[in-house]
Image (cartoon, rainbow, N blue to C red):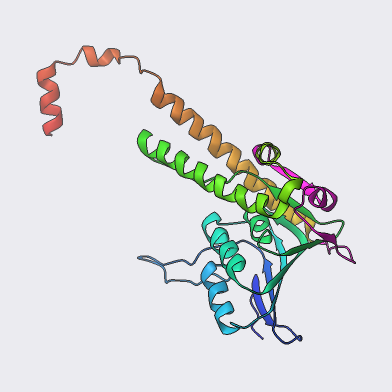
Amino acid sequence: MIHKRMWERKQSASPGTLDFYIYGDVESDDPGGWFSDPKESETSANALRDALAQQPNAQQINLYINSYGGSVFEGTAIYNQLRRHPAHKTAYIDGFACSIASVIAMAADEIVMPRNAMMMIHNMWMDAVANADELRKAAEVLDKINAAGREAYLAKAGDKLSPEQLVEMLNRETWLTAEECMQYGLADRYADKGADMSQAAEILKTANGQLAQQLAARVSLSAQMRALQEPQPPDPKEKTINPILKLFERSM
């Protein structure tokens, strides 16, 4: 048995069954740098790949999820690895499945939710500090990432959720109860017991803090884009400087 703080792989008591626990942020490996050593993430796509390789003939995979999200790139790779694996997959939402953690849950053949558990879905976001052309390219990349994420939800929901409904829900960052997840095809059945919500307040605090950071980043990015698009008034001081003197200033 391998114990890890956030992502644990356990050999189940049932032969051919693997239990995975995704508790906490989904994070990529840290390659290290000048002043830090490389670190392997407990919740990376590499960690899942290595764990699956140890049990290539697993017939049942159980995912136990209580996470408010993390790296879109890692989560997307995890989703695709699980979808590709031939085992039957069951996801149990033990509390919250937020952001990219909800996408990972969509890889399961069956999603089980206690009546007091929740999902949160929203459009993905990224940090970007660059010039105008690079910011426009970042926005285009983000549009493609969001489109790929929508496919995961729609593939699970079937005819219970239209693309138009999903876009509206993602745009307004929607929290979904277990009942609503059942209604939209994002869950298949209720769990027999309720989820342990003893840490719910802390998880909600962290999730709300992340949303506040997203909002601040979006406001800042919008201001930068407007500044780039609006013509700048000429600086009156520039008119008083002799062009010959400006040549000397550039050479200094």
Whole-percent x and y of residue 103?
64, 56
Q: Quadrant of residue 217?
A: top right
Q: Residue at x 64, y 71 (%)?
A: 7
Depth order, front residue of 228/142 = 142
**What residue span does the magenta drawing correspond to?**
170-198
Examine the rendering and report whether any part of residue 111 can be seen: yes
Figure disc tally: 0
Name the residue at 68% across, 52% down: 206
| Magenta span contains residue 171 | yes
Residue 235 is a magenta residue: no
Residue 136 higher or lower than 71, as above or below: above
- The quadrant of the rendering that contains the C terminus is top left
The image position of residue 79, as x and y in percent, is: 60, 62
Q: Is residue 203 above or below residue 61?
A: above
The residue sitting at the front extreme is: 159
> From the image, which quarter does the N terminus lie in?
bottom right
**Whole-percent x, y for residue 166 in the image:** 68, 41
Residue at 61%, 65% (x, y): give it.
Answer: 83
Asked whether 186 or 86 is in front, the reply is 86
Q: Seen in the image, is 248 located left or right of residue 182?
A: left
Q: Is residue 143 above or below residue 44?
A: above
Seen from the viewer's position, the closer of residues 50 and 16 is 16
In this image, 58 relative to 114: left or right? left
Which residue does the image show at 53% across and 78% down from the upper left? 50
Residue 131 seen from this side: no
